[in-house]
Amino acid sequence: MPLRGLAKAKNFTLGPTAPMKTFTENIHQQTSRGQSLKISGKSHSLTDNSENKKLYEYENQIKSDFDNIVPTLKEIAQIQHHEDFIELAQKISRAKLGIELPFHILEKSWVKPLDMRGLYAWCVFKQHEKLSKIFFEDDPLESSEGSKKAIEFQEFLLKCGIHLLDITPCSDGRLAHSVAYVMRIPFSSVRRRSHAGALFDVENTVNRWVKTEHKRYRENNPNEPQKNTRYLKIVTYHFSSVDPKHQGCAAHGSDDHLAAHEGRKRLYDFREAVENSFCCGASVDLMLIGLDTDTDALKIHLSSKDLEIDLEKTISTLDIYNSTLNLSKEEAEREICEIIGGKSTRNQLEGLDKFIFRIIKNNISQIDYVKQFHDGSYQDIGHAERFIGVGIGFKEVHLRNLTYFSHLDTVEEGAPDLDVGIKIFSGLNVSQDLPIPVVIRFDYSGKVPGAKERATKDCDRVNNAISIRYKNLVDQGLLHTCLTIRDRDNVHSAQIIGMSLDKKSEEAH
């Protein structure tokens, strides 16, 4: 798709520009694509090739649905003056996109040029609707609540001394797959909220911690309150090994050390807030992880005995991949155990060491995934998102560079994140005379009376605020919105409750 090429432009600086320092000392000065990854025809002994194949088929299916929009609309644009235009356009759209086009836009083609911007946004919104339906009804990642993977992983977490896993990746679309793909964690087993620069809201996170502990005391869920387990909070920042000066995290001014430092500070603030409010016995566990958005390799920061996160002492999964590539499964596992905790087998690992071992092993599969299907490093090293997601929700989005997230309750408080997204899409879409598609989402609990109505009002409120803040784009047809809600207590997919593209009702006179 033509738009995606902008992501690789050397002068494209709208997106994250956080630089890399490397994984460990022996990979410094990396500037060329895939330089530090050993490219060979063989897979790592710890790689799950069957899982890789399934994940790729899902990614390819969903992204193809979005990337087929432009060529399909180009074909439709060429026949807009055909006598049977509407019928032919719908036939083409159904065959190539699997969706119906809006009749009220098509029917005007005989009196004025076809609204291609509107059709483009409509197609993006309907493809998101289809994505949501597939995700919740078919469970393509096999990780929904109650699934075999989710049950097994929750049991594993408890063995690691963790009763809840809370991860904050950066809102950059290149980290949207960090849970389901990069770390291979069942999505229903983790609490995920993305924020620009991975700088999560401390107060909101403390409130979520309180709710978690309250549930343990009231319901013994996920385990009894007297059990010696903790709430684990992870921050995932990012950097680029291919273009460190332009394709890292803009929120931290092209400085990966600063990105790590600020992520650690936010984690410390969270821990201090919990301890100051509920005494030191209420401590939480913390973890800082760096993600190379070009190779999907991880840099895991280690903690000292006094529980302080070391910004310099890290474990590089890419180093481990390279050093164990020619080893047997048992030999590779033994080396990882030695690196983590000086143990000879994974059964001897305890607590967070056991958790880290699993993350490393899972990430080795992901490194091979990128090697097998993307030649060791993604072609779209920069931004190539298909739409902006605004509000609360989007549990169905677990694919790299599909969505730029802006989690917010109000546009005013989320303006910095949203402005970054608009700037990114001004380069990706507006520069090509295509509109910015914004999907607004508010999930709600169907168990709470009036929650659905409040979620609907939240969508309307945010939609109105967006139309005011970005009025110039809206007036030119360069920004369109789609309002969606979803009952988080149900398996149903997101429900579209309105679009800026809806047919306007005629005013009564």
Image: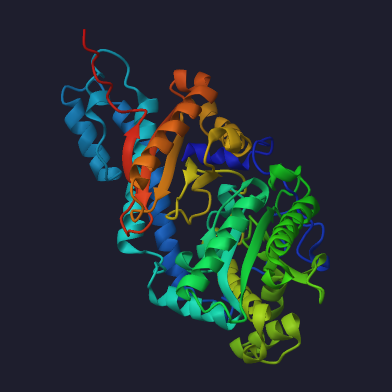
Q: Nearer the viewer, residue 342 or 6?
A: 342
Q: Is residue 180 left or right of residue 84?
A: right
Q: Nearer the viewer, residue 70 or 412?
A: 412
What x and y, as percent, mark residue 223? 51, 78
Residue 422 rendering spot, x and y as whole percentages = 56, 33
The image quarter containing residue 237 is bottom right
In the figure, is residue 229 to the left or right of 277?
left
Residue visible at 38% across and 53% down? 445
| Of 261 and 320, the residue lying toward us | 261
Q: Tell me: 107 left or right of 185.
A: left
383 over 165 or under it: above or below: above
Residue lying at 70% horizontally and 43% vertically, measured from the top left? 251
Residue appearing at x 34%, y 30% in the figure:
119
Observer able to see residue 212? yes
Q: Residue 254: percent from the left, percent from the top?
A: 76, 45
| 506 w.r.t. 239: above or below | above
- Tell me if residue 344 comes above or below residue 367 in the rendering: below
In the rendering, at what x and y percent does residue 233 appear? Answer: 64, 64
Asked whether residue 325 appears in the rendered view, the answer is: no
Q: How is the image coloured?
A: rainbow
Q: Nearer the viewer, residue 166 or 374?
A: 166
